[in-house]
Image (cartoon, rainbow, N blue to C red):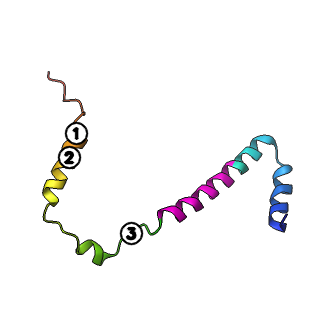
Amino acid sequence: MTNIVAEITAKSASLPPDLQYEVLDFVDFVAGKRRRVKTTGTPFQSVRGILERDLSNLEIDLAQVRDEMWKNFPEEASE
């Protein structure tokens, strides 16, 4: 065991059980955060890449997305 693992283990062992669960939740959070960063890659595209996209059908694409989004939304109740 490395020094840091031994220190974390010793300190968390001295905590009451409810706080030990908080430590475990935090470790899971940090581990998950690290996995998300590795799998998602760079969150932003370059500006040049965005500007070079073909936007000629943008209005049609937006209309299709809007229609799909509102398709199952209940209509307003009539008074």
* Magenta stretch: helix, strand or loop mostly: helix
Can you say whether 6 is above or below 25 in the image?
below
Where disc 1 sits, the SS reads helix
- For image coordinates 13% across by 54% down, the residue present is 60
Q: Cα distance, mark 1 to mark 2?
A: 6 Å
User: Callout 3, which amino acid?
Assistant: Phe
Residue hosting label 2: 66
Rendered image: mark on residue 70: 1
Where disc 3 sits, the SS reads loop
| Viewer-closest of 21 and 65 | 65
Rendered image: mark on residue 44: 3
Q: Is residue 51 left or right of residue 45?
A: left
* 1 and 2 marks in contact (CB < 8 Å): yes
User: Callout 1, which amino acid?
Assistant: Trp
Quadrant the N terminus occupies: bottom right
Can you say whether 14 is above or below 75 in the image?
below
The mark that comes first in sequence, 1 or 3, is 3
Measured as percent of width and height from the top left, residue 46 is found at 34, 75
| Viewer-closest of 17 and 45 | 45
